[in-house]
Amino acid sequence: ALSSRVLGVNGASVGGTDVQTRQVASLKALKARMRSVENMKKITKAMKMVAAAKLKQDEKRMLNAIPFVRPVQDLFERLPREDKTGTLTVLGMTSDKGLCGGV
């Protein structure tokens, strides 16, 4: 049978019984953790800025592509439509960049 053990400082048992104690974070460890959190904040901020720049660039490209999209939209609007139920044909058009979702 498996028995659970509660360990003391650094996993050592005390006397005949096992005791659980908490390690108090030293000031040095606390400062290192705070520095780590600040670095993560900086990285996150930089990632947000990169994402915003990419979004702005993509919006600009989308607006520049509107003159090329209009004729295709007009073509699809002129195609005959049938309101019958049954199988549905879907035509998917995507770019071929090789990145999943990265256009």
Image (cartoon, grey):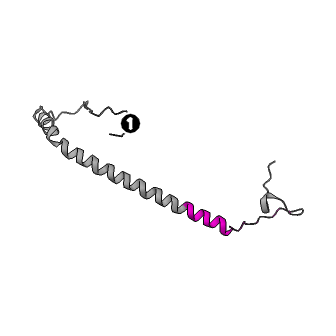
Amino acid tagged 1: Leu
Name the spot of residue 79 as percent of width and height, x first: 12, 32
Let me know if residue 6 appears in the view: no
In the depicted structure, whether residue 99 falls above or below residue 39? above
Closest to the observer: 24 or 73? 24
**Tag 1's secondary structure?**
loop
Name the spot of residue 87 as percent of width and height, x first: 26, 30
In the depicted structure, whether residue 11 falls above or below residue 72? below
Let me know if residue 77 appears in the view: yes
Residue drawn at x 89%, y 62% is 16
Range of the magenta residues?
Answer: 17-36
Residue topped by disc 1: 99
Residue drawn at x 61%, y 63% is 32
Magenta span contains residue 31:
yes
- Say which quarter of the image contains residue 13: bottom right
Magenta span contains residue 18:
yes
Closest to the observer: 73 or 34? 34
In the depicted structure, whether residue 59 falls above or below residue 15? above
Residue drawn at x 18%, y 33% is 84
Please state if 49 lies on the left or on the right of 72 as rendered. Answer: right
Name the spot of residue 46 as percent of width and height, x first: 42, 55
Name the spot of residue 19 as percent of width and height, x first: 81, 64
Please state if 102 lies on the left or on the right of 89 as rendered. Answer: right
Please state if 30 lies on the left or on the right of 44 as rendered. Answer: right
Please state if 44 lies on the left or on the right of 20 as rendered. Answer: left
**Label 1 neighbourhood size at 10 Å, few (<14), some (14-19), many (20+)?**
few
- Say which quarter of the image contains residue 20: bottom right
Q: The C terminus is located in which quarter? A: top left
